[in-house]
Amino acid sequence: MLTVGDGEVYERQLEKNPRWYQRILDVGFEENGIKPVPPENRTDKRYWNLFTVMFTALLCILPLPTGMLATLSYGMSLRDASLVILFFSILTAIPPAFMGVGGTQTGLRQQIQARYSFGLYLAVIPLLLNAATVTGFSVIAAIVGGQSIAALNPDNVSLSVGIVVVCLVSFAASLLGYRAIHIFNTWSWIPNLISIVIAVGCGGRYLHLQSAVPAATPSQVLSFGALVAGYFLTFGGTVSDYSIYHDPRSASKLFIFANYYLGMFLPSVPLLILGAAIGGAVPNVPSWNTAYTNLGIGGVMYEMLTPAGGFGKFVLVLLALSVIGNIAISMYSVALNLQMLLPFFARIHRFIFILATFAVMIPCSVRAAEAWEESLENFLALIGYWAGCFDAVLIEELVVFRKRDYASFDHASWNVGRRLPSGVAALLACVMSFGLIVPCMAEVWYTGPIAKTTGDIGFEMAFVVTAVLYYPLRWLEIKWRGHI
């Protein structure tokens, strides 16, 4: 068991570790879990890692099914879908990239930073939502990777087996922790990019076979835009987890922001658009349509690579494994979230929670794969609502109430409830905002009265209304508590 005292920060204590534990650390396991990292231990100057950790995580086949929803589910043309993807990506990648700067400046994990708005105890609510969201993304990544493996030999390799293979490989990287994830993501984008280019080169001749559809309505634009927003905004719950050991003194905040922003934007936009192109062609290419019905995007990628013969199958394996970088960082963050759930959990080693995450993820992935397209659409839409609330609170807390002073995130307070906010203001602002979010929601199972006219503008309402409500509520909380 680990010891975690009030306000205790992470310090390397090699001489105090049990021999068995030190041997594990010597293999390459990350020692720290959720303790703040003081400035003297933030020495990593490889800032390009902040770019590559996101770039590799998103340079995979995971964005493709999200892009496909534009043309397959929302009935948009490729041109309109591309414009929506570009505009909403430019806009909604800003909040998580801005929030990621806090990792280098504070040495705090993202959900520990949330305690400085939501308090020690009420922070459990966004913590659980974030863990569920990140697990959901991992499940989708595991499904698309598993579909690709199963497509190689559908008679002998089931989708479930493919999912297990992808999860096992991802588990190894996340188990080792921070350093291993950064090393893996520094280089693994290269085979990912090559395999995607080959797939497009082999199957691209069919991408022009798009169905003729009317111009997109405002409702279609906003509803699909909400999915794109959900895709980006949810990184606000984890992004600082990957930068807490980076030196805050050797690079500007703008440079750190740019690394995160470009790491998310550059791979996502082309792949989301590629997904929209594939989705528009699927109904018009019989072999693709059959493959998509049987094995989703993995089946389509197999058909795209068929002209390459045996080499195409090798490339398909690389495409299946391209999701490892994404699942690895997701498992890593979920394990950290579980450590924060209860005070006692902070004393349990991080890699135990990686095992727990792995054990939960496989059955969830297998189950969700049974209706994966519907699961994806509902999941992406719903997460955008809570993520909009969460990002609004944390950004306003930093910019308005803490005047962008990262030193106000006092390490001595990170696990001391009386020295943190109560969290009432943050929670009330989020909950009350749903008074406008619900009428603005447009889901398969529910469409609010406002959304019937406008389309889904729930995430916009979530961000704006939460920000407006948080200001007076937080001001009153500070007056009541007597400290920020």
Image (spheres, rainbow, N blue to C red):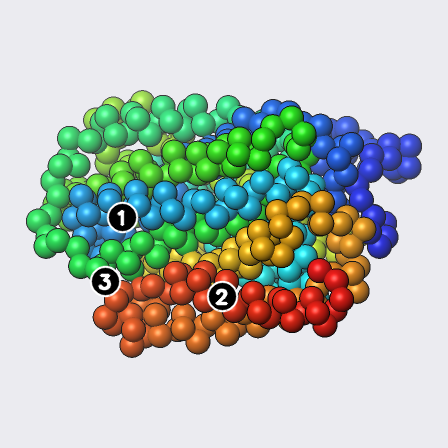
- Mark 3 sits on what residue? 219
Give the CA distance from mark 2 to mark 1.
26 Å
Q: Earlier in the sequence, mark 2 or mark 3?
A: 3
Residue that appears at 79% across and 41% down: 10
Decide which of tag 2 and tag 1 comes sooner along the chain: 1
Nearest the viewer among 335 and 258 is: 258
Q: Residues within 10 Å of mark 3 (few under 14, many from 20)?
A: some
Q: Is residue 422 above or below residue 260?
A: below
Instruction: Identify which amino acid the numbered label 3 is placed on.
Output: Ser
Q: Secondary structure at mark 3?
A: helix
Mark 2, residue position:
468
> Farthest residue toward the right?
15
Q: CA–CA distance between discs 2 and 3?
A: 25 Å
9 left or right, relative to 108: right
Query: Is the residue under label 1 in contact with that under label 2 (CB below 8 Å)?
Result: no
Which of the 4 image quarters holds residue 200? top left
In x, y percent, where is residue 408? 71, 49
Label 1 neighbour load within 10 Å: few <14, some 14-19, many 20+: many
In this picture, residue 61 sits left or right of residue 365: left
Query: Looking at the image, is 260 positioned above or below residue 129?
Result: above
Element at label 2: helix
What residue sits 41% from the left and 28% below the top? 192
Residue 395 in the image: x percent, y percent?
55, 53
Label 2 CA crowd tier, 10 Å (few <14, some 14–19, many 20+) = some
Q: Label 1 amino acid?
A: Val
Residue where numbered disc 1 is placed = 84
Q: Residue drawn at (91%, 37%), measured in percent from left and top?
A: 16
Query: Is label 2 or label 3 in front?
Result: 2
